[in-house]
Image: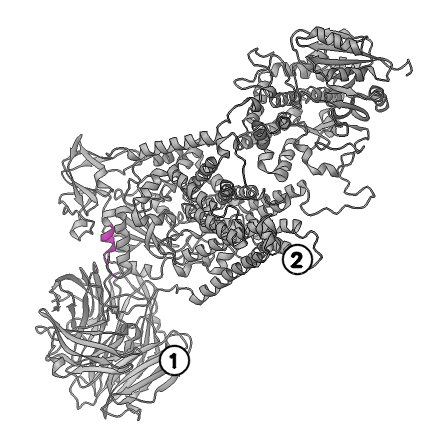
Amino acid sequence: MSPAHHRPERRWLVLVLVVLVVVGVGIAAGARGTPSVSAPAAPSALVSAPDAESSAWYCTGQSTGSGLAPGFVVLTNTTARTVDGTVTAVTDAGAEVHTDVSVPARAVATPSIPALSSGSWEGETVTVSGGGVAVTQVVHGSSGWSQSPCQSTTAAEWYFPGGTTANSDPLYISLLNPTSTPVVVDLSFMTPTGAVHPINYQGIVLKSGQVQVENVASEVQNVSTVSTVVATRTGRVVASEVQGFSGSSAGLALVPGAAHPLSYWYIPQSQDVAGGSSEIDVFNPGTVPESVTVQLRLASGPLAPLSDKVAPGATWALDTGAQTRIPHNATYSAGIEATGGPGVVVGRTVMVPTSYRAPQAGMAMAVDGLSTASPTGEWVLPPPGTSANPAVSGAAPTYLAFTNTSGADESYTVSAVTASGDRTIGAGTVPAGTTGSVYGAALSSAAFDEITVRASGPMAVSEDVGPTGGFGVVTMPGIPLAAAIGL
Amino acid sequence: MDAQVPAVVAVVVTTDPGPWFEEALSSLAAQDYGELSVLVLSMGADGAGVTDRVGRFLPDAFVRHLDGRPGYAAASNEVLSMVEGAAFFLLCHDDVALDPDAVHKMVEESFRSNAGVVSPKFVNWDDPSILLHVGMSCDKTGAVVDRIVEGEVDHGQHDAVRDVFVAPGGCILVRADLFAELKGFDGGILAMGEDLDLSWRSQVAGSRVVVAPDARVRHREAVAGGLEPLAVLGVDGGRHPVTMQMLQRRHELRAVLKCYTRIHLVRVLPQAALLALGEVIVAVLSRDRDRVRAVIGAWRWNARRLTEISLLRSELAEHRLFPDAEVRRLQMRGSARLSRYFSRLTHQGLEAANAVAVSRERAEGHDERAEVAVLTGSVGSAFSEDTDFDELDDLGRRAGRDRFGRKVRSVPLGTGRQRAVAMVIALAVITVGTRDLFFGTLPLVGQLAPLPSWSASWHHFFSGWQSAGVGTTAPASPAFGIVGITGTVLFGAMGTLQRVLLLACIPLGAWGVSRFMRPVVSPRARVIAVICYVGLPLPYGALGTGRWDGLVAYAAFPFIALRLARAARVAPYEVEPGPKWRSRPAGQVASLGAVIAVAAGFAPAVVPLVIVTGLAWAVGSVLVGSRDARWRVLVVAAESIGVALVLAAPWVIGTALAGKASVAIFGLPIAGANAPDWGEVLRFAIGPAARSPIVWLLLAAAALPLVLGRGTRLVWAARLWVMACASWGLALAASRGDLGSFTPSESVVLAPAALAVAACVGLGISAFENDLTGREFGWRQVVSVAALVFVALGLLPVVGGAAGGRWELPSQGVEQPLAFLSHPSTTGVTRVLWLGDPRALPAGGWTVQQGLAFALTPEGLPDSAQVFTPAGPGPAGLVADAVRLAVSGGTVHLGRLLAPAGVRYVVVLDGVAPSMVGTVSPSVSAPPPAGLDTDLLEQDDLQVVPGELGVQVFENGEDMPVTAERAAALPPVQTWSYPGAADVAGWQPVLSALSSGGPATGHVTAGTLYAGYAPAGSFTLSVDGRTVPQRPAFGWAAQYAAVAGRASLSLSQFPYVPVAVVVELGAWVVLAAALIGRPRRSAATSTAGATLAPTDEGEP
């Protein structure tokens, strides 16, 4: 006879164990949750890993010749080796030219692209034999100039929270298909009076490598705030927004799109000046309302937040200049948090009085939450051209700010990268939720050198570049640097 | 006795009679029938002794000595020429003793019933209370069936006079005119079956055959019972001794051929042939060689005598009064032999059904009379175990009422017939559920790629080089050997073979469970356990997702568990060591190792599961307090795995040489997001079929033995539940990537849990039957009934899932959207890179990252040769690195990086089957990692191939043929590396594909020839017969500075693999011989007495 027969209590031992295992594992597995099916979102501008085999950037929004926004691309090599690449420029008329470029170690290059024979707008695909290279583009026209990162990824949707066609301001959406697949694109515009889906901008077909620019003002006229959605039916594209300011405050803005609505956005530095205007545009492209809170913080401390519920497809145009709680000429930072849905897209439009130096108007995306988390803890700030090929005469960084988005104090180091090594131009600690900055001679000495910000935690990094009329007219976000792949 | 009674002549045929003869004679002398005379026909040597012995009891008897040993039938026929005027002949063996009134009661019954043939009631010689025969019946194929249960006590229950089809041959009263008209027995029947033949012909001639139970005869059955050899001259068994089974089968078929008309034979003979074929197959599978020889020999023997049989049929036709239809009404319906087989199967299991158990006992000398069951075959002994006979009244009808006329309420599955019906229903559900798979086309889903030809399978098994990845010299899986063997047996019908191998797994697993459960539960509980096993969703999930490995594990694991229990001598699985090696501990371990090796060829993850099982059983024993073989199980498991590894040594060594990558042989990691959750794991919902939560009820029912069980049942329930928990936990952890790179397929890992659940259900039934005895009504009874209801309900999802006919397996796989891959390439020899979830790949692959695997196949749709790939990718690992680079944003030139491997197409699979045609549940759709398409779209040298719905196909814009030439040489790089832009430009295809057997050939021009086959050092290029020096390319491939001419690229290395495989096969042969081998002969176990006379005297 089995010993178990003599000891019936063992039956319950087994039963208890089985129940514990079945229930316990179930609870543990449930508590751990199921990994997300969707791919982790990445910033639309990310400097690829230094050990990457190759990388590519996509730039669009420049015009050719004497158009609204002629410009050039800037390649910033963050690595200690020379990097070769190819710039393929193509116009909306189909003209195409390839230009080889070599960027020395820790240096910046602005390849000279031969003039294209036809077309009004152009886009560039920059292919680099390696990683660690940031590509930005500079445009400069009669109304002003702008600098912005190119995009390191394609996407099926792009969002632009701001833009205006009031005062006959030109507003364009530039589309580039750098992939090998034809894409079909729809453009939609959100205005204070509702959504507009122009028939002419539905089903736009872009062949592989094609650039096409659509004039928003021709379909949405005299609207103060226009938010744009670029959505592909098939394939993936790159999109940028070109905004001209032709009113009393002149300016030119080249705004790369945001590929994802997100819950957190940051504006590390801003300033409202008397007589000017500043607007934070919070666009909800989702299908559910978003509860949006704008946390404002002066150097002396936080202000009472502003909040609103933003309906699906609507844009909250927050006129910060009209907020009495924000003192004029005081530098402040803003953090935008959205809850209730997948998130929002945030941009900022700034106009300073005409009495200020031109350009006086500008528009830019806020720093998205994805870009605050650099895999290497390092952000790259490419210069506005090179000494031989500056964006505009006297172009230089004027104010660098970085908001600590973590819950703890974080240390930082700001360096100017030169061929002979890094030169520290600022270092310290940023308390949680506050903003640190580097400006003045220390910053302007960097001139056309690459600037890197290294931090021990997440930061929203943004740089104002001059000469302009004030904060926010030309801004350059810090581009996070990808971690080594290690293959 | 009135002098007017008809004369009866008793004919006693004797051959060297034993001491019982006197008793037989005295019984004749004691008959109260006045007109009885006795004729003794003596065969054999001791003629004078017989005369003296007869004279002592029957001084008036006539004794005639016959020359030679013509056989009982021929000897009996002598009476026709020797006797005149008799009304009846009483044809007797020399070992029957009649009751004093037997003859007159038989004669009376003959007149009363107007019967031509009368049979008495036969009882045991030594114990007259035991019945032997009360008439017999037979089916359309001549298989004789007794009417009583072996050992049935005579309570008068069969004492009604009735018609029977066969009057057993020990003592027959036959009308003399009828006997003369029929020309007596068939003289061509030397032994066994003459009674069937005579009875059949009598009925054809219009005579009734009745049994008169009032006439009682004791019968020793000295020959049929195997107590005495039947020495008959002139029988031919060929190379093997003639057994009585052989004679029985020959003569049954002879009677069939002779007694039916030609027209009726057209209908019956094919059925008989089909049944014989089935019996041969079953006998072959069960190693019952005697039966195989008997069945086949019967047909051969009769085929040689067709002329003689035709003449005899013509003679019979002259006397025919009854048509075949009338005769058939007296026979049994259906197949007696088949009924007996299933009856035994359900009562005693497969071995008994195949009479293997009996023959084993005979071989071991445990039971001398065991020979009866085997040799007499149809003479009732086997079938008599069917308890259904208890329910038959004297008219053979099922009364279903007791002797008081009340309706009898039978226990569910209490009879063999009910259990057989239950099994048939289960089989029918499976058959209905798989009907489309057997008759339709199997889609290219999961591992369901078409099998290679039988010759290709053999070649693959022996080949020193495989095309997997970019090529490898690692030995192939033993699965190719198995496929080669079975494909050869089926004459190359590989499509049929694939279906048979796939679909047979389910009934095979059921058979395994039946065998596993036999020692511990009742037949009823065993049937329920089997039904529960086939009612779990696991095999249908594996089938619905095209997983070979899961099905094989499902089929093999019950056998592994059974043999593990036997080898470890866990109660009640102990096997007494017998004369055969396989019954000894070493043989048991070797046997288990062989099973593991076979299963591991298809499902390598079975190997660690054996250890897990051993460990679980040990822990279960500890928990429940059993010391029985507690740790010996682990030792045996380890030993058997060692045997398995030795039996698959070349493959194992090749796998081990892959280093860390070797663990991939067990399975590739799937994405945690796509992994089944705990609930799905517990209820085996890993596939698209039978995913209903109702399956939970089976698990609940499986807990019954833990609640009710006692003794062995509780101990086994504990072991099995611990095994189930381990299996479930392992499946969950592996599918979620918690075990690192050890990620066996969940369909394999869940096999032990499935066995445990089914077995515990069976144990629960057994506990209900045994462990509630003496307990008052209470919660235990309620729980038991609830468990039974749960089992019934829990099976419904599978029953419902059967309606579709294919277990939700998609109707089309990737072969539909990728049909263009089947067309010959115009750009030379290229390869296809498959990317997707490991479960979605139609070929064996390797990991890129969790949830993403890759496979590299020659251009075209893959076949099974690409399904079982080596553990390590070799230089194809560069492909994985390149893909990893692409998905991590590290390159935009993936096409270029893939070029040296000859990749022309990149196919991204969006699920187990293309979503456009598939019906796969989203929960098992196995999509690739999100963002993969995006990453590939951003590669500037990959172009989307438009129009391929359901999958995403990219064409490499910078592809290189696998063999190509150009003028410029490549840098002679020694380490694995990627090409630059210039390295992939300008190549032209040059050689044919490196076929599995032959070299790659073609004309080359002067320049550089590139060959993307690995390992490069194993290949030689010759141009016009001259060997061209080799230089490295990309660190793993080769380039040659070729001159113009006819080039040939061929494998040139010592055939390590073929030699090793030959040794491996030798090991299998030796093991098989040892396991199947004959026992050592000894005087005590000699079976000489059971065989007939030597065969060197030729045929009669």
Q: Is residue B1074 visible?
A: yes
- Seen in the picture, residue B902 relative to A409 is either above or below; the reply is above
Q: Are marks 2 and 1 on the same chain?
A: no
- Seen in the picture, residue B711 relative to A408 is either above or below; the reply is above
In reply to whether residue B30 is colored magenta, the answer given is no
In the rendered structure, which segment of residues is drawn in magenta? B889-898
Between B917 and B766, the one lying in front of the other is: B766
- Seen in the picture, residue B231 relative to B523 is either above or below; the reply is above
Q: What's the CA distance linking mark 2 and mark 1?
A: 70 Å
- Seen in the picture, residue B20 relative to B690 is either above or below; the reply is above
Say what secondary structure mark 1 lies in.
strand
Residue A409 location in percent, x, y?
Answer: 27, 79
Closer to us: mark 2 or mark 1?
Answer: 2
Residue A377 location in percent, x, y?
Answer: 24, 71
Between B484 and B820, the one lying in front of the other is: B484
Q: Quadrant of the C terminus of chain B?
A: top right
Res. A194 mark: 1
Q: Is residue B924 visible?
A: no
- CB atoms of marks 2 and 1 within 8 Å: no
Residue type highlighted by circle 1: Gly
In reply to whether residue B894 is colored magenta, the answer given is yes
Q: Quadrant of residue A185?
A: bottom left
Say what secondary structure mark 2 lies in.
helix
Q: Quadrant of residue B400?
A: top right
Between B1003 and A482, the one lying in front of the other is: A482
Res. B780 mark: 2
Res. B5 mark: none
